[in-house]
Image: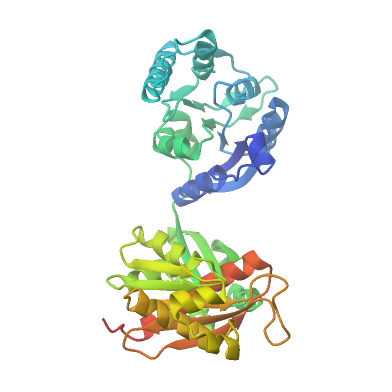
Amino acid sequence: MSARVGIVVTGTEVLTGRVTDRNGPWVSEQLLAMGAQVAHITICGDRPADLTAQLSFLADQGMDLIVTTGGLGPTADDLTVDTVAAFTERGVYLDTELQAHVAQIIRRWRQLRGITDPENEASRAGTRKQATIPTGAQAIPPTGTAPGVAVPASRVADGSVVPPILVLPGPPRELQAMWATALDTGPVVEALAGRTEHRQEIVRAYGLSEADLADTLRAAETDVSGFADLEITTCLRNGEVEIVTRFPESALPIYRALAAVLAEHHARQIFSTNGDTIDDQAAQLLAGHRVVTAESCTGGMIAARLTDRAGSSAYVVGGVVSYANDAKTGVLDVPATMIAEYGAVSEPVAAAMAEGALRRLDADVAISTSGIAGPGGGTELKPVGTVCFGLAIAGRPTTTRTLRFPGDRSTVRSLATTASMHILTDALRDTAVVR
């Protein structure tokens, strides 16, 4: 059986939605990759009673390890260490070596920022606070100014045993930089010693409904011997279905049987069986080419995704965002008469936008979008969510397509952007691009 882990994300700013939690999912992903089983992720504000309640809940659920994030700073609301110490019925002490290390980091930080004011008592008190840890705990050197803490399992007054608790800082950059060192601490090594090595495989499909997938999985549950050994999670995101399967190495033949069932029923929709995203595939196919975008309803989102995935904009020549008809005409050379005849949201205009971008920016691949993403602009023939796509590739006829997407402006834009990536990769995969 895998080691069970619970994660507590602390911070009133996260609880109230002012800051999006990045730590819980990141820590969970790392633990899952190691073969641990993440049972719970909870969020609580910077209140000792609420953190204590979360720790109590996770301990009662039989966790082998509890991970907390946040609340390690020098201010009054940073109370995680004191709360964990009280929960585990441990005292606290000032680690003088750690205090000197934190003080040195703060001095260096002040020098880099040109702060010349002498250190005051408030600053020294903050340093002492960050260097105070529970008795018997192992300090983890800071990657910012806040050390982490690994607290061993604790037997408390009522006779129960509290599992080891790993206390990590809140800033994601600091937490991630500290992670490898935290895994090597004695309490964490002991807690995760019983984990079972798991594999994780990801299948991605486009144009596959969750209902059809559910039917296939129900059939597989009957037809695939040992199906219960597979932990399958499905997620619909931007029109794509992600099927994540975790299993012990011994269950690899069972997973292969499941993969064969998925391929048999949904070969046309499955575009990735090795975890690659559509953005990864687009970047690979476009390597060595000059690509541009001409976007209306997607507002530059296609160009951003292509650039982000490649890690460099070397192959992305640029992009044109042309909402107004004047911009389509003046920048992309779309004839005004064409817009008047067919409308800005039309396949002829989408084709002309792609061809104009290809020509104007000296590229060999161009994709365009023109659509009605927001309320108030639709008609009976072209309702909100109608998007026309154009794809121009040097040496090949320009192709167009019209799709309709449900949802609000943001949803339509996201769905149209993902559709663009699939239109692009499908075309490049089917026929070699003429260079």
Residue 307 horizontal/vertical position (percent): 39, 62
Nearer to the camera, 203 or 254: 203
Nearer to the camera, 78 or 410: 410
Residue 61 horizontal/vertical position (percent): 67, 40
Q: Give the colour scheme shown.
A: rainbow
Q: Name above or below for residue 93 compared with residue 9.
A: above
277 relative position to 41: left or right:
left
Nearer to the camera, 264 or 282: 282
Q: Name above or below for residue 317 compared with residue 54.
A: below
Rendering quarter of residue 96 = top left
222 relative position to 148: left or right:
right
Question: Which image quarter is the C terminus in?
Answer: bottom left
Residue found at x 51% / y 19%: 130
Would residue 61 be seen by someone viewing this image from the given angle? no
Residue 366 horizontal/vertical position (percent): 40, 77
Rendering quarter of residue 129 = top right
Q: Name above or below for residue 285 compared with residue 28.
A: below
